[in-house]
Amino acid sequence: MSFLARLEKAMKNLKKGNMKAFDVIYEETKKIVFFTIYDILKDYSLSDDIMQDAYIMVVNKIQQYQDDSNPRNWIITIAKNLALNEYNKHKKDILVDYSENEQLAGKSYDKDVDTPLLNLAKKVLSEDEYQILTLIIVDSFKRREVASMLNMPIGTVTWKYNEAIRKIKQAYERMVVQNER
């Protein structure tokens, strides 16, 4: 009996409630499922946890499996989706030690960054606006990352950033007009 035939038979038996069939499914697919997850997460223990979640989902969703389709691909798709969800969840986490990075804590912009445009920004912006502007433009953080760092809603960060850009643009235009006179 071929690999796919054994796996298909085990899937049908699991659908009928035969939990011994799960052992066959697990043994036939555990390596490919693990490495599919590991390829996404690059973390051995997290991949192992997600693999266990994937097999729990296989058992819980077995009635949704279409007989005589590709059981291996169905299981891998479940594992891959769980791994991608986990990856996206962790991708949003910001792992920054603020105590070791003065710039993120807002203590060193004045001495580390010195350009005419930022000097203008220091003069016309509030402290919050300046901090948000420099985190986004100078340090290349995304707005959601800045929102997390400053413990502000992303809407507030976006509004303050847009307001800072507007103020700098107006101040720059006034400065250019004055220099042309």
Image: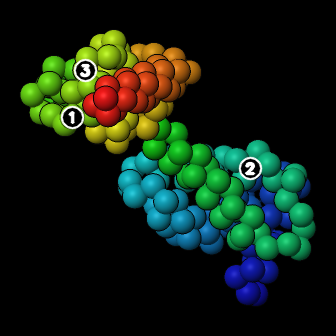
Amino acid type, callout 1 = Pro
Mark 1 residue crowding within 10 angstroms, few (<14) / some (14–19) / many (20+): few
User: Label for residue 116?
Assistant: 1
Instruction: Confirm whether residue 147 shows in the render.
Output: no
Measured from the top left, where is residue 169 in percent x and y? Answer: 42, 29
Judge from the rendering whether residue 134 lies leftward or rightward of residue 27; answer left or right: left
Circle nearer the N terminus (3, 1): 1
Label 3 belongs to which residue?
Answer: 122
Mark toward the viewer: 3 or 1: 1
Classify mark 2: residues with Cα within 10 Å, few (<14), some (14-19) or many (20+): some
Q: Residue at x 85, y 72 (%)?
A: 69
Name the quadrant of the C terminus: top left
Residue 81 shows up from this direction: yes
The colour style of the image is rainbow
Q: Measuring 43% from the left and 48% from the top, which residue is drawn there?
A: 46
Identify the residue at image location x=72%, y=53%. Answer: 58
As drawn, the label of residue 174 is none
Decide: few, some or many residues near mark 3? Use Cα within 10 Å; few <14, some 14-19, many ≥20.
some
* Residue 37 x, y percent position in the rendering: 52, 59
> Of 91 and 135, which appears nearest the observer?
135
* Secondary element at tag 1: helix
In the displayed structure, would residue 19 be above or below residue 69?
above
Q: Can you say which quadrant of the picture contains the N terminus?
A: bottom right
Q: Which of marks 2 and 1 is in front?
A: 1
Disc 2 marks which amino acid? Val
